[in-house]
Image (cartoon, rainbow, N blue to C red):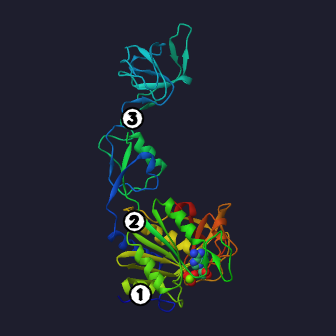
Amino acid sequence: MKPVGKPGKTGSLMAVEVALARLLEMADASKIREHERLPLAQVQGRVLAADLVSTLDLPPWPNSAMDGYALHLADWTGQPLVVSQKIFAGQAPEPLKPGTCARIFTGAPVPAGADCVEMQENAEVQADERVRFTETMNPGQNIRPQGQETTVGELILPVGTRLGAIEQGLAASLGCAELDVVRKVRVAVLSTGDELIEPGLALGPGQIYNSNRVLLCSWLQRLGCEVIDAGILPDDLATTRARLGELKDVDLILSTGGVSVGEADFLGIALREEGELTLWKLAIKPGKPLTFGHFRGVPVIGLPGNPASTLVTFALLARPYLLRRQGVKEVEPLKFQVPAGFVWPKAGNRREYLRGRLENGRAIIYGNQSSGVLRSAAWADGLVEVLEDRTLIEGDWVSFIPLSEVLS
Ligand code: AMP
Ligand code: MG
């Protein structure tokens, strides 16, 4: 296969949103169809494989929103009322005796015949134990009607919803003990580079520790993926080919490094020979070179090797791709506008994702924005987006993407 979209000269950079749209098209095309049924407690980070439809009205019966007294408003003439029953949450009440009220507690079913709950703060128990109400009351007050939250047959969570604590709670409130989720995406993580060694070993001349491997493996686990750690790949064609060939049963090979322009690019050669290679030069900083293709039919995404570049391109491109493969619709992270608390005097031709944080409502940035400096991201709590060809003075609006949005 011939390379497609080989990096051209500056000026032929691909906008981030164009690259994302293309990746998402390819993700749609290879969507994962298999699913599994899991206990509710185990679905955190997974994607719903079938619509969740309510089989219940919630609440199943009208219940009291307050500790107080249930009564039938028409029975109240301003005179104190006798308390004819006491209803706690979890009990089934008798119909309300005409001309009386019922002592009731929060969450308890409102008895048939009552149309109003008055809170106990507006009620006085007299010496004869009858209750005097001190304020005017309205029909329906302090009653949560049956089906207020959901009714039978209502769509509660659509297929493709990512499940977290809130969705688990909601499913539990509907009585679901298990949910159908898309099977885990199997992602093989490969770190390329002769210079890499694993932490714990002594650093030799010219070597650096592999930081991308644990960063990506840990992040992917949080995303609900099954991670296959494929180790370090030396800059060598035969090994590259052999290692890629071993990864037959995965949904994605995610590699870092080896995609810089000018470098002996063994990953690219292997893909070109036994699959397909698309090289994009993106208008993104840090980042720029991104490889997409497949090796013997297995999709491959090659991220740039500098740790901050790996982080940014994973967050903005690979993560949405992985979510879409599981059928998630909204895959782009939330971003919001904040005033810049820094100046940006020199416009660039690439969209910058600066590692920054919010301080007094303004975005400030880490001093060293080099793509090799992962410490910038540890200091940061978000990515500050500066568009192509933009300069900034303090107070100009910039987009801020919280890292918490993309890390899970
Ligand atoms: P490359 O894309 O292979 O040219 O790598 C770009 C830069 O990132 C080089 O300085 C590499 O040493 C560095 N790098 C590549 N992979 C890793 C990794 N897994 N961990 C830390 N640094 C890396
Ligand atoms: Mg390299």
Q: What residue would you read off at disc 2?
A: 324
What label sits on residue 371 in the rendered view? Answer: none
Vertical placement of residue 14 versus 89, above or below: below
**Residue 313 visible in image:** yes
What label sits on residue 59 in the rendered view? Answer: 3
Other residues around mark 1 within 10 Å, as few (<14) / some (14–19) / many (≥20): few
Q: Which of label 3 and label 1 is nearer to you?
A: 1
Other residues around mark 3 within 10 Å, as few (<14) / some (14–19) / many (≥20): some
Nearest to N terminus: mark 2 or mark 3: 3
Label 2 element class: helix
Label 3 element class: loop
What label sits on residue 5 in the rendered view? Answer: 1
Query: Amino acid type of disc 2?
Result: Arg
Query: Amino acid type of disc 3?
Result: Pro
Nearest to N terminus: mark 1 or mark 2: 1
Nearest to N terminus: mark 3 or mark 1: 1
Residue 237, position as x, y percentages in the image: 47, 86
Residue 241 in which image quadrant: bottom left
Whether the residue under disc 1 has CB within 8 Å of ligand 1: no
Query: Amino acid type of disc 1?
Result: Gly
Q: Is residue 112 left or right of residue 83?
A: left
Vertical placement of residue 403 versus 68, above or below: below
Q: Which of label 2 and label 3 is nearer to you?
A: 2
**Residue 18 visible in image:** no
Q: Report how far apart the C-alphas of labels 2 and 3 lie in the structure.
A: 34 Å
Residue 197, position as x, y percentages in the image: 61, 75
Label 1 element class: loop
Other residues around mark 2 within 10 Å, as few (<14) / some (14–19) / many (≥20): many
